[in-house]
Amino acid sequence: MRNMENAQPARIGDAAGTLPRKSRLLVTGGAGFIGANFVHHWLEMHPGDRVVVLDALTYAGNLANLEPVKGHPDLKFVQGNICDTPKVERLLREEGIDTIVHFAAESHVDRSIHGPDAFIETNVHGTHSMLKAARKVWLEEKTVPRHRFHHVSTDEVYGSLGPKDPAFHERTAYAPNSPYSASKAASDHLVRAYHHTYGLQVTTSNCSNNYGPFHFPEKLIPLMIVNLLHGRALPIYGDGRNVRDWLHVSDHCRGIDLILRNGRPGEVYNIGGGVESENLELVETLCAVADDAFAALQDLCSRFSGCPAARGDKSSSLIQFVKDRPGHDRRYAIDCGKAERELGYRAQVSLAQGLRNTFDWYVQNEWWWRAVMDGSYQRWVETHYR
Ligand code: NAD
Ligand code: DAU
């Protein structure tokens, strides 16, 4: 099955394709990693727009992620589940929402292997609930003159690439391999279907691996940073040669912003960082970033005395190869040519700079990751890495 590349086209700048001057956004999953970064981005770049966050505050959602914008006059937080269709409908009506940016999802591949049910519930049923509410309020009740439903998806729906395969583009056939990517693929198809069948004005972005501030420390980069600061093992799955394309979350947020403003309804846009890296190479780079930081800042050595770098040893000595992830996709690479040509998208943060900034952020925001690593986090680590 193919994605919505061939969906009904509209010109850039069409009334249906551009946001109203002052927009009223509903951001689902806005207390999660990318959603929260997007909320920060939008409030800064679009003063006067209303932003309503709907988030169930699962283990991955955290109000601390919205701390920098707490009390902002244009921001409202609502705790709730995207599967609660009447609640979503009420929010769309009462807040006069004209734009949905749909991030809420179960997002961790390893968790989907241990327990797929939550992924089907949130990612498939939850997305369908959002679409049903949007159809009812926007298309039937016609509460706003124009609307946009933006769905945030993943490059994982395209499956796994061989070493010489061309990068994923918007017409690459779907071939999801994990319960997570299968649930995201299903949600993408529902979004596409609501456009074709009912005329809902949708866009979808499929992006690569994000990293940056507020990234929950179950994912590779923040897990490695937190572990190495503690002097704990850095678990690399399999041979460490799996390849990912790394996208700084600020570039992703700019990409979504461009799609919301200039993307054509019914279309899909791939967003990536343009940098492929093998996991082992990435972790070794992070270790080198840590070693340099410890050598330059004496304060770090006393704060994180368990880290080998605090004793002048190499952080990479902590690397440990562990059992591979079942069905582990070998390589992802993303072709963002369409977003570059149509929207002027280009990633601005280099991987080297992004990794340094991200390491510094975790060092400076120890309060944040200590707060999110509660009992349920510890239990996850024990179950998964045992
Ligand atoms: P995350 O796990 O950090 O955050 C998910 C957020 O959704 C949390 O705040 C959580 O509380 C909320 N949520 C979960 N279930 C909910 C429900 N039923 N109702 C309301 N809220 C609910 O995820 P993330 O990494 O920020 O990813 C955001 C989106 O981007 C997801 O759709 C994910 O599939 C997609 N994506 C992520 C990446 C990545 O590298 N992180 C890459 C590509 C695509
Ligand atoms: O490609 C986009 C996807 O990127 C998003 O859709 C997902 O929501 C997001 O979680 C991410 O999925 P990955 O599975 O690629 O990310 P993760 O950080 O879990 O793993 C990145 C790579 O690192 C992957 O090849 C597995 C490996 N890994 C991961 C962990 C947690 C390890 O080697 N050791 C680890 O402990």
Image (cartoon, rainbow, N blue to C red):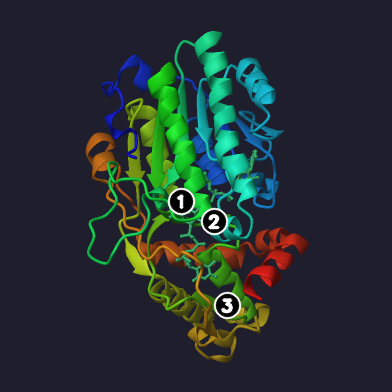
Label 3: which residue? Answer: 228
Q: Nearer the viewer, residue 256 or 250?
A: 256
Quadrant for residue 16, please give it.
top left
Marks 2 and 1 in Cβ contact (< 8 Å)? yes
30 is higher (above) or lower (below) than 203: below
**Mark 3 neighbour density, 10 Å: few (under 14) some (14–19) many (20 or more):** many
Q: Nearer the viewer, residue 331 or 50?
A: 331
Label 1: which residue? Answer: 249
Mark 1 or mark 3, earlier in chain: 3
Label 2: which residue? Answer: 213
Please tell me which residue is depicted at 34% across the width and 52% down the height of the picture.
Answer: 348
| Residue 184 image point, x, y percent | 49, 44
Which label sits on residue 341?
Answer: none
Please tell me which residue is depicted at 66% across the width and 48% down the height of the picture.
Answer: 61
Mark 2 or mark 3, earlier in chain: 2
**Mark 1 neighbour density, 10 Å: few (under 14) some (14–19) many (20 or more):** many
| Residue 132 image point, x, y percent | 56, 23
